[in-house]
Amino acid sequence: MSVYAVLFPPANDRMKPAVEAAFERRFEVAAGQILVAVEGLTTEQVAQKVGPDGANGQYMVMPVTNYWGWHDKNLWEWLKVNPLV
């Protein structure tokens, strides 16, 4: 399983619905910050699923390869269920 961060300006009201429609396994960290867990997709393929050729406005997709910090328990539980490869 690979985890990607989809980052976009919170005012971009098209991106959140696009991410929700494209990915079942997701976690909204904060407005404009959504983690998605997928199998077998590259960063570019994830980006094309949520905003093909920029159709849904500004956004960026980055692979999550490591993490550390202090956050809500739900985030840590989601990451445990969707481990990084």
Image: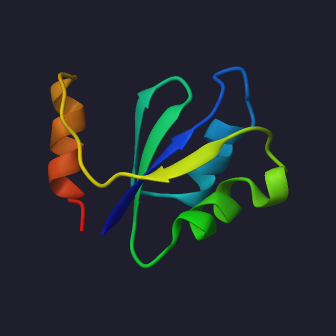
Residue located 18% across and 55% down the image: 81
Q: How far across and how far down the image is residue 46, in percent?
A: 57, 63
Q: How far across and how far down the image is residue 25, in percent?
A: 39, 55
Q: How is the image coloured?
A: rainbow
54 lies above or below 38: above
In the image, 83 versus 16, the foreground residue is 83
Tell me the quadrant of the picture where the N terminus can be found. Answer: bottom left
Residue located 24% across and 57% down the image: 82
Which quarter of the figure has residue 74?
Answer: top left
Q: How far across and how far down the image is residue 30, in percent?
A: 44, 24
Which quarter of the figure has residue 10?
Answer: top right
Residue located 24% across and 35% down the image: 75
58 lies above or below 9: below
Residue located 54% across and 64% down the image: 43
In the image, is 8 to the left or to the right of 34? right
Tell me the quadrant of the picture where the C terminus can be found. Answer: bottom left
In the image, is 53 to the left or to the right of 15? right
